[in-house]
């Protein structure tokens, strides 16, 4: 055998090993995803009081198509919506833009936006959003260039694409609570209020929700739509420079870490009750109305679609599974939510318009960690929208 022939043989053997290794790795990954999907589905079915699922095919009017591929589990139970509620803020924003009340090209100073920014409370959403615009931040996430400005529409994009809380609160400030809380079809949704207020209530340098009595009092206040304490904290953060400086120092300190540890997982889960609640049925109808262009008007719906259907991390779903796909997730301690609409590329429902809302509250800590990392909910809703795989477990 010649030297060249031997070299070719070695290369072919090496290539074969690589191919086999990649195939095995892909099989293991696929198996792991299947295990995670099954675990997630089982958790939902075993704890129906803490979960809700609504899935169906809808027509050009956004109404249910009786095709046998609909699913309703705890559809009308109010559960913590987390960042899914930002679709309502987006709806109010796009409506104001179309009506001429807001100019999407208005330049907003970073300083004005970051007045609503509380470090370490948004999963780096603000940092990632500014990075997408080429703006660098310090170790806490504040922009280095406080003289910079960004378009109002970029603030709305950061709210949806990266789930920015500061961006959400800034838009709520511009829109007003009445407009944000008057979205058609969401009559059973509890009031949307300041995310900054709820975050400060959970952990500020004067009081911590590690204090069980305070935590239960504030949960009752929210149930009674009393936001006085939240508004007081927001006013201090926005208008009292000394109080704000102490709060920011607290967020970078060991004292904050110790308080968070003292609050513990169950305390964090309970504190989630300070955020708005909605039902899976109403979120499904909202997403279906957006998808078919009937929410408020075709122009408003189209503007909303442009943001929901361009979330950077959703590209694999759009590329491999759907002709069209729009979504908004929600994530906080013990909670994983996802509202989406799409047109599947394959399966028995290929080419049909589908909506899926999956909401889970009060998840155990290790389960939550595993399934946030594994992004299980995206694969579960993908199966539900296409009536494949996990779909059979829900029947």
Image: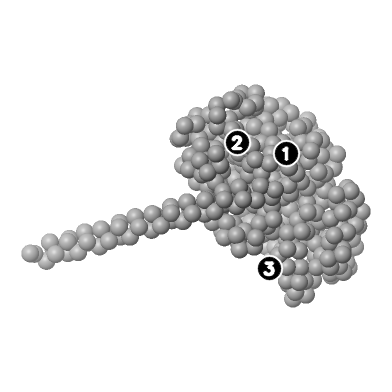
Closer to us: 49 or 19: 49
Q: In this view, does 26 lie above or below 357?
A: below
**Disc 2 from disc 1: Cα separation:** 13 Å
Tell me the number on the disc at residue 71. 2
Q: In which quarter of the image is residue 259?
A: bottom right
* Residue at point 76%, 46% (across, down): 277
Give how far across and how far down residue 206 sits, in percent: 87, 69
Q: Earlier in the sequence, mark 3 or mark 2?
A: 2
Identity of the residue furthest to the left in this view: 1
Separation of residues labelled 3 and 2 (CA atoms): 45 Å
In the image, taking residue 117 as reference, residue 13 lies left or right, namely left
Circles 3, 1 touching at the beta carbon (< 8 Å): no
Res 308 seen here = no
Q: Is residue 331 left or right of residue 28?
A: right
Report which residue position mark 3 lands on. Answer: 139
Q: How far apart are marks 3 and 1 (CA)?
A: 42 Å
Q: Of helix, strand and loop, which one carries label 3?
A: loop
Q: Residue furthest bottom?
A: 254
Image quadrant occupied by the N terminus: bottom left
Image coords of residue 59 (percent x, y): 60, 25
């Amino acid at each position: 055998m010649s030297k060249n022939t031997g070299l070719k043989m070695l290369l072919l053997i090496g290539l074969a090993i690589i191919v086999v290794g990649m195939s095995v790795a892909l099989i293991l990954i696929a198996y792991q995803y299947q295990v995670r999907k099954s675990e997630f589905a089982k958790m939902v079915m075993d704890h129906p009081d803490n979960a809700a699922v609504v899935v169906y095919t809808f027509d050009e009017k956004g109404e249910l198509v009786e095709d046998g591929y609909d699913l309703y589990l705890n559809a009308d139970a109010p559960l913590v919506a987390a960042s899914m509620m930002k679709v309502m803020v987006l709806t109010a924003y796009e409506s104001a833009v179309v009506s001429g009340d807001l100019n999407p090209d208005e330049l907003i100073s970073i300083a004005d936006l970051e007045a609503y920014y509380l470090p370490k409370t948004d999963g780096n959403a603000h940092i990632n959003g500014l990075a997408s615009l080429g703006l660098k931040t310090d170790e806490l996430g504040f922009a280095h260039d406080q003289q910079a400005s960004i378009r109002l529409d970029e603030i709305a994009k950061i709210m949806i694409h990266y789930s920015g809380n500061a961006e959400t609160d800034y838009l709520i400030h511009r829109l007003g609570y009445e407009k944000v809380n008057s979205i058609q079809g969401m009559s059973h949704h509890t009031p949307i209020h300041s995310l900054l207020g709820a975050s400060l209530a959970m952990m500020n340098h004067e009081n911590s929700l590690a204090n069980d009595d305070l935590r239960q009092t504030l949960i009752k206040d929210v149930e009674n739509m009393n936001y006085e304490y939240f508004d007081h904290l927001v006013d201090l953060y926005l208008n009292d420079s000394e109080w704000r400086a102490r709060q920011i120092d607290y967020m970078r300190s060991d004292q904050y870490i110790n308080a968070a540890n003292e609050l513990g997982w169950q305390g964090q889960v309970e504190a989630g009750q300070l955020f708005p609640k909605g039902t899976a049925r109403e979120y499904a109808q909202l997403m279906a109305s957006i998808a078919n262009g009937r929410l408020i008007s075709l122009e408003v719906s189209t503007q909303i679609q442009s943001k929901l259907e361009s979330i950077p991390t959703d590209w694999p779903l759009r590329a491999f599974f759907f002709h069209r796909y729009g979504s908004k997730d929600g994530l906080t301690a013990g909670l994983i939510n996802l509202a989406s609409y799409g047109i599947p590329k394959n399966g028995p429902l290929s080419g049909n318009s589908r909506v899926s809302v999956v909401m889970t509250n009060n998840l155990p800590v290790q389960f939550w960690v595993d399934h946030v990392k594994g992004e299980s909910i995206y694969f579960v809703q993908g199966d539900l929208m296409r009536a494949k795989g996990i779909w059979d477990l829900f029947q």
